[in-house]
Amino acid sequence: MSVNATGKRKEARASARLEEGEGNLRINSRPLESFSDEMVELMIKEPLRLAGDLPENLDIEVEVSGGGKIGQAEAVRQAIARGLVKFSGDEELEKKFEEYDRYLLVRDARTTEQHKPSMSSKGARKHKQRSKR
C-alpha cells in the first residue's frame, strides 16, 4: 500500500510518497542526512518524531521544488505529516499534529504581496522618494 500527499509553503511545493519499507527518508533522491543545515533537518524530522514508531517501517520519498530552503523544509514536513495521517488513518495522530503545530496539516496562506505597476522593483509598495520643494 502506498500513499501520496502534498505540502505547500510560500513558493515551495512538495509531494511525498509513503510505502511500506525499511524506514528510509529521501528528499529529491538524496538521504536527509546529506543536508548540511541542521535546523532544516530538525524541522523535517518533527512529524516523524511525533508519529512515534509508525515511520520506522515506512519508506518516504519526497520531491520538492521552488522557494527557499526554509519554505521547502516546511512544505516537506507538511507533506510528510499529511502522508502519515493518511497512511495510518489515526485520528489521535491527527489531533497530536494539530495541537503541536496546526501548519503540519493546514496550508499557511500567507504569501508575498504582488508588486504594483509603476513602482520600483524593490518591493510591493516602495516608491521613489519625493521632495516637496
Image: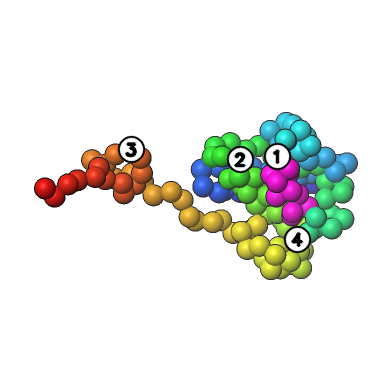
Within-10-Å neighbours for mark 4: few <14, some 14–19, many 20+: few
Confirm or deny contact between disc 4 and disc 3 (CB under 8 A): no
Q: Amino acid at mark 2?
A: Lys
Confirm or deny contact between disc 2 and disc 4 (CB under 8 A): no
Determine which residue is flagged by label 4.
89
Instruction: Tell me the CA gap for discs 3 and 2.
Output: 23 Å
Q: Position of residue 28 (x, y in %)?
A: 68, 33
* Label 1: element kind: loop
Q: Is residue 94 above or below residue 111?
A: below
Q: Amino acid at mark 4?
A: Gly
> What is the magenta segment's predominant secondary structure?
helix
Q: Amino acid at mark 3?
A: Ser
* Label 3: element kind: loop
Precedes in sequence: disc 1 or disc 3 = 1
Instruction: Tell me the CA gap for discs 1 and 2.
Output: 9 Å
Confirm or deny contact between disc 1 and disc 2 (CB under 8 A): yes
Precedes in sequence: disc 2 or disc 4 = 2
